[in-house]
Image (cartoon, rainbow, N blue to C red):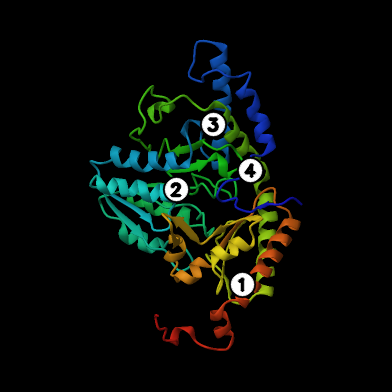
Amino acid sequence: MQLPIYMDNHATTPLDPRVLEAMLPYMTKVFGNAASRNHAFGWEAEQGVEKAREQIAKLIGASAKEIIFTSGATESNNLAIKGVAEMYREKGDHIITQVTEHKATLDACKRLEKQGYRVTYLPVEADGLVSVEKLAAAITDKTILVSIMYANNEIGTINPIAEIGKLCHEKGVLFHTDAVQAVGKIPVNVISDNIDLLSLSGHKVYGPKGVGALYVRRRNPRVQLNAQIDGGGHERGMRSGTLNVPGIVGLGAACEIAMNEMEAEGKRLRELRDYMRQKFENALDYVHVNGNMEHHLPNNLNMSFVYVEGESLLMGINDIAVSSGSACTSATLEPSYVLKALGLGDDVAHSSIRFGLGRFNTKEEVDYVSDKLIDTVLKLRELSPLYEMVKEGIDLEKVEWTAH
């Protein structure tokens, strides 16, 4: 076992050596521009791109012609949300999303609000799931798009996507999902899930960074988008720019590997995740899981270790890469907006750690991480007056604190 240990696979995944192997020829010998249609160098590059299009489409139950290449899921989300908003402006100006979306979705929606669009940000339930009933109540005759993520990047909850898609189709509203954390981890099918637009990214599925894709439905209904990048009319006019051929080939290879190994990998990671959770719960009191564990990604575990400061905890386990429930922005330590949306107090949100297990993690690493974390929590709690008070049976809610 080598240190440091990487357990932050929601942020990014290491490149699978098999993906690198598929990419290498396209970085050297096969260097043509996929848009060069008048010689063999371009044809060969284009063949690599089209093969990748098929590999990605197969993983999500789409057809190859419905896959548009982008620089990553942030661009895919922007193209989907702004592209639909502009294309269907005459039909309506209302968009619905949820408060726990990735910033790529929330900030795209905020930009549209500045342009006069109306956006509804749905709350989530205490388990992190969006309510289909609340979504149905929010839809109006001016609603043109619903954008709800497939699985949450912090707490791993999986939304009732097929149900949401069915509702949207019944109401004649387009449905987009940011499926970055779901694709390659759990079965995703754009047809049975009633999805019209789907964003995915290479570096979350053991592929390269800087490449992603957007699925755009071609029939029932045919989705049209206003391009956000102009010049050259690449990708059927939806996304201009010379294609990143090695990256695209890598994304395709990563999707094919995921297709073949997802079931076995999911089972292994779920067992490791549950084993890790059990170790924490057996050794520590005042710990709890964030998110709905029934509808949950196999590789995610987000836990609050109450009466411990998350940043102190991270410093105590500095040879392990995980994420805390705090987001460090502009020199202030803010609790995660996702955890706050679940109704957690700042103290509990700050004490949360997200473990993102991945393809290359071993049981030996899980043992090391959980043992080290348990040890650190116990040491920090020894220094915590709040923990001491709680152990003595004092109700902290009833304590009247005085400021000095």
* Quadrant in the picture for the C terminus: bottom left
Q: List the residue tagged with mark 4.
A: 14
Asked if marks 1 and 2 touch (Cβ < 8 Å), the reply is no
Q: Where residue 235 appears, x then y in whole percent? A: 43, 27
Amino acid at pointer 4: Pro
Q: Where residue 70 appears, x then y in whole percent? A: 46, 34
Indicate left or right for 397 with 321 as reference. Answer: left
Q: Earlier in the sequence, mark 1 or mark 2?
A: 2
Q: Residue at x 58, y 19 (%)?
A: 31
Q: Where residue 338 appears, x then y in whole percent? A: 45, 61
Residue 150 vertical placement versus 253 (above, below): below
Query: How far separated are the C-alphas under marks 1 and 2?
Result: 40 Å
Query: How far separated are the C-alphas under marks 4 and 1?
Result: 32 Å
Q: Earlier in the sequence, mark 3 or mark 1?
A: 3
Query: How far separated are the C-alphas under marks 4 and 3?
Result: 22 Å
Q: List the residue tagged with mark 1.
A: 380
Amino acid at pointer 1: Leu
Indicate left or right for 217 with 59 as reference. Answer: left
Viewer-proximal residue, 115 or 378? 378
Q: List the residue tagged with mark 3.
A: 53
Label 3 crowd bin: few (<14), some (14–19), many (20+), radius 10 Å:
many
Could one spot residue 307 in this view of the protein?
yes
Observer-side mark, 1 or 2, equals 1
Q: List the residue tagged with mark 2.
A: 177
Q: Earlier in the sequence, mark 4 or mark 1?
A: 4
Observer-side mark, 3 or 1, equals 1
**Secondary-structure class at tag 3:** helix
Query: How far separated are the C-alphas under marks 3 and 1?
Result: 50 Å
